[in-house]
Image: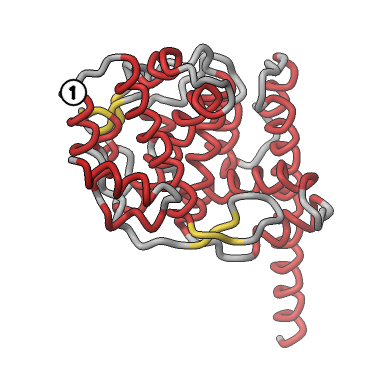
């Protein structure tokens, strides 16, 4: 009886290891597909066909997401993909990005070892959520050209985001993409091209039926995460709320220079987090913001 029990345990463990090995290899293949076609390259039909068969059913949603993100004019901004997926899909997407980042790290690892280690550890849900929407909005920025989200209205409570933190992550990742559209016009060219930047700002999406700047639910508990390769963990809100403040201030400069519409300027100042001194600790523009409101 004891011998039979040992044989049974051996078979269960062997099957588990074998199953993880198959899944690991499939995730690696999916990671290669992602890295090959995440930028401007359009995948050939033969590459897509290879992912349509021979993969575990549990990977189906991950495959659909990665395939959609590889297309130009994709449907990532439909509810099907904006909905927070199951934790298996979240983790697979997280691992795929880890594989993509791996060659750019100081401590490069063998892909099989990297996947095996990530499959066996518990990753905080907020990190998984962040990576999913980071991947989604990166694909939107890379593939959906020209940039224009003016007809998009994100209703965050419809996407399975059941906390201020989850909704805040979605918002901040989207606004990182939006802010990147005007960064060059406001920070690289001299003098700043405020007209062109304002054209892009007018193409930003709405959130919950209102202009992007009116979203202010950013009081969730902060957390640390590795944002830049090889730089260690840092405050999530310092980085992304800090970027948001830069975008809002650039918007303010554009309005002042291009339209001088005092009503719009006042709406931006008083309807956004620009006025909220409790969040100034997350921005390097604290002195500028305090100076603006001291004059009001």
Tally the marks: 1
Residue 105 lies, with reference to residue 35, above or below; the image says: below
Is 151 left or right of 118, judged from the image as shown?
Answer: left
Residues 67 and 137: in front is 137
* SS class, disc 1: helix
Question: Which quadrant of the structure image shows residue 150?
Answer: top left
Quarter placement of the C terminus: top left
Q: Residue at x 52, y 17 (%)?
A: 144
Image-based side of 20 in relation to 203, left or right: right
Q: Quadrant of the N terminus?
A: bottom right
Q: Residues within 10 Å of mark 1 (few under 14, many from 20)?
A: few
Picture coordinates of residue 56, whole percent (x, y): 63, 42
From what the image shows, is residue 52 above or below residue 243?
A: above
| Residue 108 horizontal side relative to residue 179, left or right | right
The residue depicted at 68 percent of the width and 51 percent of the height is 229
Residue nearest the viewer, comparing 294 with 145: 294
> x, y percentage for residue 129?
46, 49
* Res 55 quadrant in image: top right
Give the quarter of the image for residue 80: top left
Residue toward you, 122 or 246: 246
Q: Is residue 229 above or below residue 31?
A: below
In percent of width and height, residue 272 lies at 25, 39
At x 66% / y 43%, what residue is drawn? 96
Looking at the image, residue 36 sits to the left or right of residue 163; the answer is right
Say how the picture is coloured.
secondary structure
Q: Residue at x 59, y 18 (%)?
A: 71
- Rendered location of residue 8, percent (x, y): 71, 73
**Residue at the spot of label 1:** 262
In the displayed orientation, state which residue is furthest to the bottom: 2
């Amino acid at each position: 009886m004891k011998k039979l029990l040992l044989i049974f345990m051996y078979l269960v463990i062997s099957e588990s290891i074998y199953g993880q090995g198959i899944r690991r290899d499939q995730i690696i293949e999916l990671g290669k597909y992602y890295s090959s076609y995440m930028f401007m390259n359009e995948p050939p039909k033969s590459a897509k066909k290879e992912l349509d068969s021979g993969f575990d059913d549990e990977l189906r949603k991950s495959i659909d997401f990665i395939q959609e993100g590889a297309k130009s004019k994709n449907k990532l901004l439909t509810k099907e993909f904006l909905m927070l997926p199951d934790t298996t899909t979240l983790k697979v997407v997280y691992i795929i990005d880890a594989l993509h980042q791996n060659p750019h790290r100081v401590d490069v690892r063998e892909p099989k070892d990297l996947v095996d280690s990530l499959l066996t550890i518990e990753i905080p849900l907020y990190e998984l959520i962040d990576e999913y929407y980071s991947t989604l909005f990166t694909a939107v920025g890379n593939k959906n050209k020209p940039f224009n989200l003016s007809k998009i209205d994100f209703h965050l409570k419809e996407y399975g985001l059941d906390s201020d933190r989850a909704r805040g992550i979605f918002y901040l990742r989207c606004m990182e993409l939006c802010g990147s559209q005007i960064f060059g016009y406001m920070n690289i060219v001299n003098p700043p091209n405020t007209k062109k930047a304002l054209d892009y700002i007018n193409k930003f999406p709405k959130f919950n039926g209102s202009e992007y700047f009116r979203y202010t639910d950013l009081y969730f508990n902060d957390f640390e995460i590795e944002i830049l390769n090889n730089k260690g963990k840092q405050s999530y809100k310092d980085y992304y709320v800090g970027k948001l403040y830069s975008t809002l201030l650039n918007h303010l400069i554009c309005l002042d220079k291009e339209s001088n519409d005092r009503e719009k300027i006042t709406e931006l100042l008083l309807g956004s987090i620009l006025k909220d001194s409790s969040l100034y600790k997350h921005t390097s523009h604290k002195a500028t913001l305090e100076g603006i409101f001291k004059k009001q």
